[in-house]
Image (cartoon, helix red, strand yellow):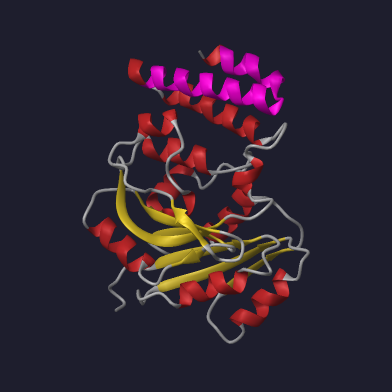
Amino acid sequence: MNQLPLVSVICLCHNHAKYVSQAIQSVWNQSYPRIELIVIDDGSSDGSKEVIRDKISGREVKFIDNPTPIGNCAAFNKGFYGSNGEYIIDLAADDILMPERVLIGVNTFMKSNAGVTFCNVMNIASDGKEIGPHFKKEVVPQGDLYIELIKKYFISPPGMMMKREVLVELGGYDESLSYEDFDFWIRSSRNWDYAYTDDVLVKKRKTKGSLSEKQFQYKTKHQETTLKVCQKIKELNRTKNENLALRKRCLYEIKQCIKQGNLRLIPSFLRLL
């Protein structure tokens, strides 16, 4: 068994007292035997810390308690740099892993040269009721996804599993950003292929106040992060088609700036055209 790759699941909690126990239990329910669980509480004020301590009592789990919030990217990095796994899963404390999630993820890596794998995800309501899968019947691209990921978001972040060497190469998540997904996709896909499996292996909970919800709020600060990532794309691009993809992305983001009242960002997006 010790010859199997170690998988590190980094579970990040911020005011998820209602859900974190279920998230942790979903890691313990995995059919794959070699898993390292690291739980990080990022300055919760709703009793999450007590729930976590009670849940992991007597179990071999590394618990990192941040007294005050440092943000998703920095908190994840603390967990990552304290981990040992060959493969990494970033698990939000309100999401749930299906029992075969890790096993199928490892098998997908073994069958491909990918640096990142992603699966289908079942969206659920705050009470756990199923809403529907992220991918329905569409053909999901895989392989070299750099241009596709510039054009639009289409991966559900909870469905990702990453090789450790990818995160090492990137220096972890960029801690200057308010959200990590877009930046990680762009920087990782520049040098690494992605592999997809259509199995629904994760349940993603839709809750009020989530990062994905805040991305579309009026005057959201997430658009500043999106601009920074687009500026990185400009530096990473090598071909005409990649520059055309960035142009399409910037035109879309300009429309979003108008809708969400971030007019001051428009000149910066225009300069990238």
> Magenta part of the protein: which range?
242-270
- Residue drawn at point x = 43 percent, y = 59 percent: 88
Q: How many marks?
A: 0
Q: Quadrant of the N terminus?
A: bottom left
State the image quarter where residue 17 is shown.
Answer: bottom right
Q: Position of residue 244 (x, y in %)?
A: 40, 17
Asked if residue 6 lies left or right of residue 4, the reply is right
State the image quarter where residue 143 is shown.
Answer: top left
- Residue drawn at point x = 54 percent, y = 68 percent: 38
Is 117 situated above or below 144? below
Whether residue 120 can be seen here: yes
Q: Residue furthest bottom?
A: 58
Q: Residue furthest left?
A: 111
13 inside magenta stretch: no
Whether residue 239 can be seen here: no
Is 26 or 80 nearer to us in this picture? 26
- Residue drawn at point x = 60 percent, y = 74 percent: 21
Magenta segment, prevailing SS (helix, strand or loop): helix
- Residue drawn at point x = 52 percent, y = 76 percent: 25
Is 23 situated above or below 207? below
Asked if residue 166 lies left or right of residue 57, the reply is left
Is 191 situated above or below 79? above
Is 128 or 7 nearer to us in this picture? 128
Q: Position of residue 105 (x, y in %)?
A: 33, 61
